[in-house]
Image (cartoon, grey):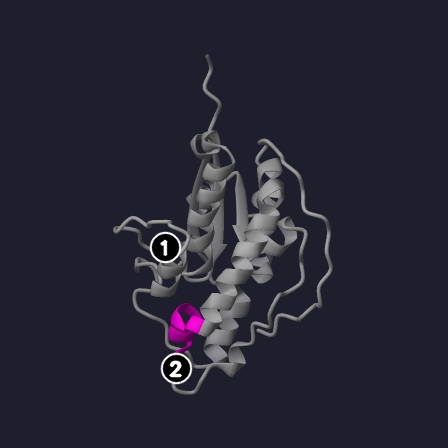
Amino acid sequence: MKTKPTVHLLFVCVSNRVRSPFAEFFFQKMMSQRDSRLRKRVKVSSAGFISNKMKDFIVQSHTASPDPFYGRPMADTTHAALLSHDIVVPADWESKKLGPEMVKDADLIITARPDQKEDLVILYPDALPRIFSIREISKWNQYLFSEDFRTVPADKNFWDYAEEDPDYVSKVLDETQKLLVRAFPYILEQLGLEVGEKPEERLIDTQEDLI
């Protein structure tokens, strides 16, 4: 009997320490709960990519970045959130920078931010049909909360706030989880796999991305 080929799903956020690793492991759990065979069909990974919009913000805000920026453990807040779902992360897991080979190998790339998709399709035009933002593929393009980094507390480093502030990160991961649940059947469909019931379209108040 011929073995069905494995497909590769890649989640992308900025530092690969909060949204994309959460998506990587949470999506694997959703597949296991839906059908254990999906775990054998779908390779799920994650990586980080800094869009030009985010680079401009970092420069304008005089924000110092960790050195090295990648090759770091998952953020403690993300690790704790996954543990709350009984998801254990390998001890040697480290954040990774998105590279050309990852883009080439991925059958589907899902970005945390719309501006990341915008930049990636310019850098990798051949990958255009395979790149979606999480809101796009979930059919829910509005924001659940306003992501305004101009309100970072004065006593906090930007990256400490974006990756470890309990209030901010809990909102980020709550939104990520809801969008993943909603996007689940659409992601399977895009990968050419079994499709279940799709959520009904719902409208919520739009809040503009302020960065």
- Image quadrant where residue 83 sits: bottom left
The residue located at (73%, 60%) in the rendering is 203
Q: In the drawing, what numbered circle is on residue 83?
A: 1
Contact between marks 2 and 1 (CB within 8 A): the answer is no
The residue located at (31%, 54%) in the rendering is 94
- Furthest-top residue in this view: 1
Q: Is residue 122 visible?
A: no
- Helix, strand or loop at label 1? It is helix
Q: Inspect the image, locate mark 2, and give the three-letter code of the amino acid beneath it.
A: Lys
- Helix, strand or loop at label 2? It is loop
Q: In the drawing, what numbered circle is on residue 112?
A: none
Q: Position of residue 40 (x, y in %)?
A: 43, 31
> Magenta stretch: residue 150 in it?
no
Q: Inspect the image, locate mark 1, and give the three-letter code of the amino acid beneath it.
A: Leu
Magenta segment, principal secondary structure? helix
Residues rendered magenta in the picture:
156-166
Is the residue marked by circle 1 packed among few (<14), some (14-19), or many (20+) residues within 10 Å?
Answer: few
Residue 195 in the figure: left or right of residue 57: right
Report the number of discs: 2
The residue located at (35%, 63%) in the rendering is 75
- Furthest-bottom residue in this view: 154
Q: In the drawing, what numbered circle is on residue 156?
A: 2
- Comes first in the chain, label 2 or label 1: 1
The residue located at (71%, 63%) in the rendering is 204
In depth, the one of 55 and 179 nearer the eye is 179
State the CA–CA distance, disc 2 to disc 1: 26 Å
6 over 72 or under it: above or below: above
Is the residue marked by circle 2 packed among few (<14), some (14-19), or many (20+) residues within 10 Å?
Answer: few
Q: Position of residue 108 (x, y in %)?
A: 54, 42
Q: Position of residue 103 (x, y in %)?
A: 48, 45
